[in-house]
C-alpha cells in the first residue's frame, strides 16, 4: 500500500502566498500585499491564492538579470539647482 507523502518543495507545482513570501524574506501580510499588487505572480483557485513555482522562479531570474533599459542617464547636469 502506498503512503500519502507530501511532495518536496522542488516537486510541488505551487506555493502558498506565505511560503513564497518566506522565500523572499517577507511577512505573511507583506506577501499577500505584494501578491495583491501583482509583485508576486499568483493564480486564484476559488478563494485560494497560489503561486506557481515556475512563474515565481522566472520572476526571480528576471529580477537578477541586468535591465536593458537604464534607470537614469547618469547626467547630473540636468538636475535643477535650488536657490
Image (cartoon, rainbow, N blue to C red):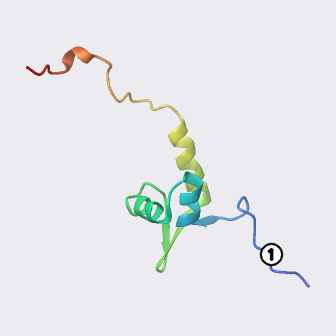
Label 1 Cα neighbours within 10 Å, binned few <14 / some 14-19 / many ≥20: few
Would you say 83 lies left or right of 24 here? left
Q: For the view shown, which residue lies furthest in the front direction?
A: 83
Position in image of residue 8 (x %, y %): 75, 64
Residue at position x 51%, y 41% from top?
63
Residue at position x 54%, y 53% from top?
25
Is 56 rendered above or below residue 1? above
Identify the image quadrant of residue 1: bottom right
Position in image of residue 20 (x %, y %): 56, 60
Is 38 rendered above or below residue 49? above
Q: For the view shown, which residue lies furthest in the right direction?
A: 1
Which quadrant of the figure contains the C terminus?
Answer: top left
Would you say 9 lies left or right of 66 here? right
Residue at position x 53%, y 65% from top?
17
Q: For the view shown, which residue lies furthest in the left direction?
A: 83
Q: Nearer the viewer, residue 36 or 80?
A: 80
Would you say 29 lies left or right of 65 here? left
- Circle 1 residue: 5
Amino acid at each position: 500500500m502506498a503512503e500519502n507523502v507530501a511532495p518536496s518543495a522542488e516537486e510541488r507545482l505551487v506555493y502558498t502566498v506565505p511560503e513564497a513570501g518566506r522565500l523572499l524574506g517577507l511577512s505573511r501580510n507583506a506577501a499577500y500585499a505584494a501578491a495583491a499588487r501583482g509583485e508576486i505572480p499568483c493564480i486564484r483557485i476559488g478563494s485560494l491564492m497560489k503561486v506557481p513555482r515556475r512563474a515565481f522562479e522566472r520572476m526571480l531570474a528576471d529580477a537578477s538579470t541586468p535591465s536593458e533599459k537604464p534607470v537614469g542617464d547618469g547626467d547630473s547636469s540636468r538636475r535643477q539647482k535650488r536657490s
